[in-house]
Amino acid sequence: MIYWKIFLANFIANLLGYGGGPATIPLLEHEVVDRYSWYTTGEYSEMVALGNGLPGPIATKLAGYIGYDQGGLLGAAIGLFASVAPSLIMMIALLGLLLKFKESKKVKRLTQFVRPTIAVLLGVMTYHFFFDSYVSTGIMHTAIIGVLGLIFLEKLHISPVYVVLGALVYGAVFL
């Protein structure tokens, strides 16, 4: 039964996650935190942070980790397949149709409506991550990591990999 749940969690999140990995993150969070209770919000946010520091698509990294953690190697394989299956099915089924109508005003308008929705989903997820961080570590540590992360990313243009690693070191030393 766990393999079916791993498949469903990843398949549903990736099926509805129009826009790629960033759109999938809050949907997958709903599945693994709220629906199946495999992780807390804090644990999930740590997975996302670590996954963002590694090369490659975030959705497959999360699927592989969650699948492995919940069902071993077979669970990881099922999670990875479930994360790419919606795109694979849609590409095969709709490629001809999309090529035919790619210049359509309706298709372009659909994309314009979907982007703000993704932004709202990411904003809500960020709020939950910060609130959980505030509750578990306090406002001081949350503010320090948040402000330093913003400065390093936006002002100093340091790679997100190094910012995530720095936050991990900060957490290991001070938390």
Image: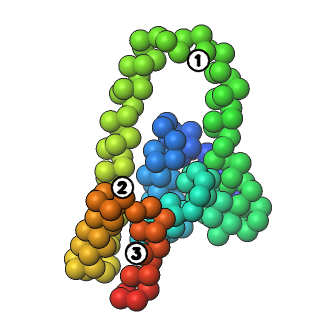
Tag 2 residue: 125
> Pointer 3: residues within 10 angstroms few (<14), some, or many (20+)?
some
Q: Nearer the viewer, mark 1 or mark 3?
A: 3
Q: Which quadrant is the C terminus positioned in? A: bottom left
* Residue type pointed to by label 3: Ala
Q: Residue at x 22, y 77 (%)?
A: 139
Measure how far apart labels 1 and 3 are at the Cα level: 42 Å
Side of 46 relative to 87 (left or right):
left
Observer able to see residue 130: no
Reply above or below: 36 against 42: above
Reply above or below: 40 against 86: below
Task: Tell which circle, 2 or 1, labels the residue nearer the N-terminal end.
Answer: 1
Say which of 63 and 101 sits in front. Answer: 101
Q: Which quadrant is the N terminus positioned in? A: bottom right
Tag 1 residue: 98
On the image, the x and y values in percent for residue 151 come to 28, 64
SS under mark 1? helix
Reply above or below: 58 against 136: above
Q: Residue at x 69, y 35 (%)?
A: 88
Labels 1 and 3 touching (C-beta < 8 A): no
On the image, the x and y values in percent for residue 12 come to 56, 44
Side of 28 relative to 88 (left or right):
left
Task: Tell which circle, 3 or 2, labels the residue nearer the N-terminal end.
Answer: 2
Q: Nearer the viewer, mark 2 or mark 1?
A: 1
* Residue type pointed to by label 2: Met
Q: Residue at x 68, y 32 (%)?
A: 89
